[in-house]
Image (cartoon, rainbow, N blue to C red):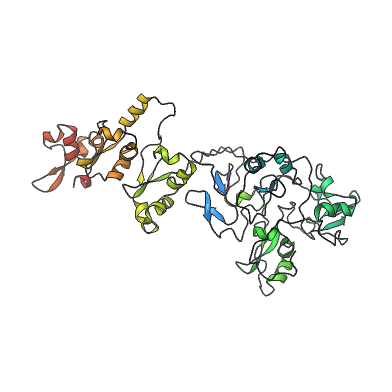
Amino acid sequence: EPSSQPSSEPSSQPSSMPSESPSESPSAQPSETPSANPSRGCDNLRPDCGWGIFNPWTCRCDCPVGICLDSNLQCYRTCSDTINTNPFAGCAPGWDCPWYPDTSAGHCKSEMHLSQFYVIYRTASECCEANFAGSSTCLTDSKNSHVPFPFPSYSVQPESSGPQRKDYYFPDLSGEMNCMYGKNYEDWMMTAGYEPYYLFTNGRDCCSMWYPTRSDCPNFSDAVNGYVENVADDPYSMTNYYFPDFTVDNCGFGRDYPAWMGEGGFEKWYLFTTGEECCTKFFPSTSNCPYESSVQTGYYWESYAENNPNSDVLPPIDQDTYYPDLHSNTCINGKDYPAWMAEDDVYKRLYLYHDAEGCCSFWFGSFSVSECVSNIIVSDVTDTTGTTNSTEEDIAAQLLAKWYPVLQESRCANDGNMPSFMLFDGFTDWYLFNSMSACCGAFDCTRQSISEVSTLSVGDTYYPDLQSNTCIKGKDYPKWMAEDDVYKSLYLYSSAEACC
């Protein structure tokens, strides 16, 4: 606990979790899987999130504090964007908050305020399997390490502190951060499964579970009832607080306060139930303090995605894939990348991207991004390497159907007559392509491809007139220009630009 009230943001992050965490919890736990699970597909998305966790409800990776999405939409890029906020603001510990390994406890824990943990997991089972594989009790201990919280959709109707309510000792989670005595505890504390862990007939029992380090526990002054004060009516950690926002020198309000303000005892100095307390302490000369007062609700990921009803039929999310083509000094937009680029997670990170800028910046330098992006090659195909059960004959037929460069003639073809060396292992990735645009992008076609001229109609054919040094549109070209596919590719064009 700080020895004096800090006047500004601390220079380092807290070194431990709050000591007020309960030491035991009920056996009844909410499911790890939230009930709001839209019918959403996550096609073409990789669940590997690096330092983050994959969110199946938004089809996106959620990153911890200090880590942001990179060009691959994975959590590998260090950043300061989330230092002054909390990316998991409003999550419920033990339910949809991330899990992390606590080696001192020998199991995993789930918290909303994680400013120092970068190895996080979406479920307790994933965390236990990765960090406590030899433990037969890790999963049970992990789930039992959290007092159950009401579901976000749990509706609580305020009740008066009338004679029907008994006097109990209870933890004041949003006010004094101490055990109080009286009838003005929050209604959800009386519901089944919560009462044994929040309402006590003996003050020592309440203090032992919730505030074992406080010498002034219990506090016999009147506790503030969240309903009476008209503040957030959801229990901690989904409670909204006023907090000093040092980025604008004013007090904000909500659940998205910096994660470090909610741990290590800092919540006593930086989180307030009234705006007046926050403003008086940190910004007494600011006239419009606090600058916000709207209550934040919903799931934590609603900060960047809409929570659509489960009954809505949502289209699958199919993001573009970009991969580098070193021949053409740009990136290709398509799924026809060589199979080895997706062999493992390291290769995926290096070669497969979900935005053109990320691919171009990494492979061709930040100074060449604009030129690279403007020359992106769009693949014509959606299939990649075929089925995994293909026979040798099937694979050979697939290779013969690909596009290849006719090196001496500066064009591409897909007539199956490629040189035999292009079919050898190690050469196919460099010389065979699933689309003409990819082939021409790699080998700079200056003449038309055979398949393209074979589809020309008479009305849209251009041919060179060597005497006038220009191109003519029409059907009166010499017959020899159309005698075979080679002549067609050399002399017949579908546009004036290509002919000229």
The quarter holding residue 291 reads: bottom right
Vertical placement of 493 versus 330: above or below?
above
Residue 170 screen position, x and y as percent: 84, 53
Compared across the picture, whether 462 is left or right of 362 comes to left
User: Based on the displayed image, in which of its 4 quarters is residue 479 positioned?
Assistant: top left
> Residue 489: x percent and y percent?
20, 38
Which region shows up in magenta?
42-53
Q: Residue at x 30, y 41 (%)?
A: 439
Identity of the residue furthest to the left in this view: 467
* Magenta-colored stretch includes residue 343: no
> In percent of the image, x 90 and y 48: which residue is there?
164
Q: Residue 93: give x, y in percent of width and height.
A: 70, 48
Which of the pair 77/95 is nearer the observer?
A: 77
Q: Main secondary structure of the magenta part?
A: loop
From the viewer's perspective, tell me whether residue 273 is left or right of residue 38: right
**x, y percentage for residue 141?**
74, 42
Q: Which residue of the protein is positioned furthest toward the front in this rendering?
A: 134
Nearest the camera: 337 or 491?
Answer: 337
